Image: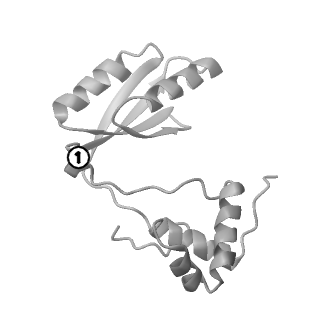
Amino acid sequence: MPNFLQLDPVDQAILEILSDDARIANNALAERVGVAPSTCLARVRALRESGVLRGFHAEIDLGALGRPLQAMISIRLTVHARAQIEDFTRAVRELPGVLSVFHMTGVNDYLVWVAAADMNELREFVVDHLATHPAVAHAETSLIYEHSRGPGLWGAADPAH
């Protein structure tokens, strides 16, 4: 049976608020969850040390950086040996333009979320790094029209973001 960390309502509220705004000041976070700033800081540290809170991330407008085209690329591997899976995962995570790599079950082994400047750059990325990779049996690209965040784990994040 998995060993889940039991979170109380204050820890859940801290995670919910941080998932919506990771830049919130500790004093403001403490006030919103109803604890002293020192208590809030200790709880955030404990959440980080336990591995529940893994990092803080910025939401970036990729179009403003000249990479407005996003795609999900489905990958099927030729062989499913552990060494090949680990090598492929490591190689793909290091490629420029890769935003996330998902190792999946089902027909496809991976979904790779990428950002590119235009269709030509996306095509070159797929041809140079994926379709011709010796571990890849099949690569299928789906363009992303729009990406929106969901309501969060507890359903309270602003869906407009």
Q: Residue furthest top?
A: 134
How crowded pointer 1 is (Cα within 10 Å; few <14, some 14-19, many 20+) is rated as: few
Q: How is the image coloured?
A: one colour
Mark 1 secondary-structure assignment: helix
- Name the side, left or right, on which 11 lies relative to 57: right
Q: Is residue 151 visible?
A: no
- Name the side, left or right, on which 145 lies relative to 157: left
Residue tagged by mark 1? 65
| Relative image position of residue 147 (x, y in whole percent) | 32, 55
| Relative image position of residue 82 (x, y in whole percent) | 64, 22
- Name the side, left or right, on which 16 lies relative to 76: right
At horizontal 78% and vertical 52% (from top left) the residue drawn is 2
In the figure, 57 relative to 102: above or below?
below
| Relative image position of residue 129 (x, y in whole percent) | 36, 21
Q: Is residue 153 visible?
A: yes
At horizontal 82% and vertical 52% (from top left) the residue drawn is 1
At horizontal 51% and vertical 32% (from top left) the residue drawn is 109
* Foreground residue among 53 and 35: 35
Amino acid type of the residue tagged 1 in the rendering: Leu
Marks counted in the figure total 1
In the figure, 136 relative to 44: above or below?
above
In the figure, 155 relative to 63: above or below?
below
| Relative image position of residue 42 (x, y in whole percent) | 69, 69
Quarter the C terminus occupies: bottom left
